Image (cartoon, helix red, strand yellow):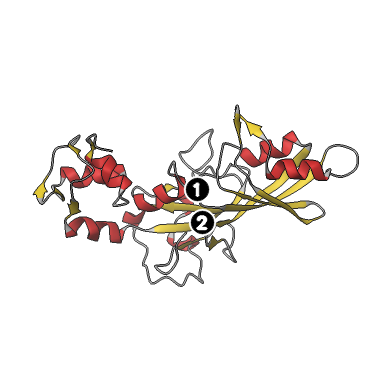
Amino acid sequence: MTEPLRLSKRMSELGLCSRREADEWIARGWVRVDGKVVSELGSKVLPTQKITVEKQAAAQQARRVTVLLHKPVGYVSGQAEDGYKPAVTLIRPETRWKEDGSDESFHPSQLRSLVPAGRLDIDSVGLLVLTQDGRVAKQLIGETTSIEKEYLVRVQYTKPGTLPEADLRKLNHGLWMDGKPLLPAKVRWQNADQLSFTLKEGRKRQIRRMCEMVGLRVLGLKRVRIGRVKLGELPPGQWRYLRPDESF
């Protein structure tokens, strides 16, 4: 790769920050290329050039928080729609989990640019990550992410008898959606009416659509894990900070 590319894109590729953060840092004069400050948005660099950031950028990034929310039914993950409230409205001092072991103190500035890194449907519950940190967002929803997400799904078979083993194998690998094959998944029975789904992708309403393809109706869907981070005992409607010793 020898073609020049946008500085902000290159910074994102290197894992320094998100593109939005990069543009902000460039505009503030916090980015150097081969030792020289570059403050013009849209500037391009070669892959061989050395990019460094000023300590102010690192300090700003260190102050950005990531929170874990147990989203209940009836809240949308992102922007308000159809009269439903966004999940971020649940991030308040009084809804912080009392057993949160983080030393972080809540401040209203933490709500600024706090966005969901991934989504949960309005009728789904469980672990939702909201972050101010572009690195976390890129890790969880970037084009190249392969982080596992685990769901517990209560289902009802809509045909006579029970789900054939062949259809369970299809859920694991072999289904297509929107003209493309789905990545292999791990789908297994937890009990008579509940399946565990572990996915490395997240197409819109993917699990519900997968279930429909084999005659299963979804009665309830709960996300219990993202990468190495588990929902655990976090109560519905409450949240906690991602601890420094935790990573996805």
As drawn, the residue found furthest toward the front would be 1
> Is residue 132 in sight in this rendering?
no
Residue at 68% x, 38% y is: 174
Viewed as shown, does residue 219 lie left or right of 3?
right
Instruction: Give the image location of residue 135, x and y in percent.
Output: 36, 52
Look at the numbered disc 1 and give the secondary structure of its residue: helix
* Disc ID at residue 87: 1
In the image, taking residue 222 as reference, residue 63 lies left or right, namely: left
Label 1 packing within 10 angstroms: few (<14), some (14-19), many (20+): many
Count the numbered circles shown.
2
Closest to the observer, 2 or 50: 2
Q: Residues within 10 Å of mark 2 (few under 14, many from 20)?
A: many
Q: Helix, strand or loop at disc 2?
A: strand
Q: Which residue is mark 2?
A: 69
Q: Residue furthest top?
A: 179
The reply to whether dot 2 and dot 1 touch (C-beta < 8 Å) is yes
Compare residues 185 and 25 and report the one nearer the observer: 185
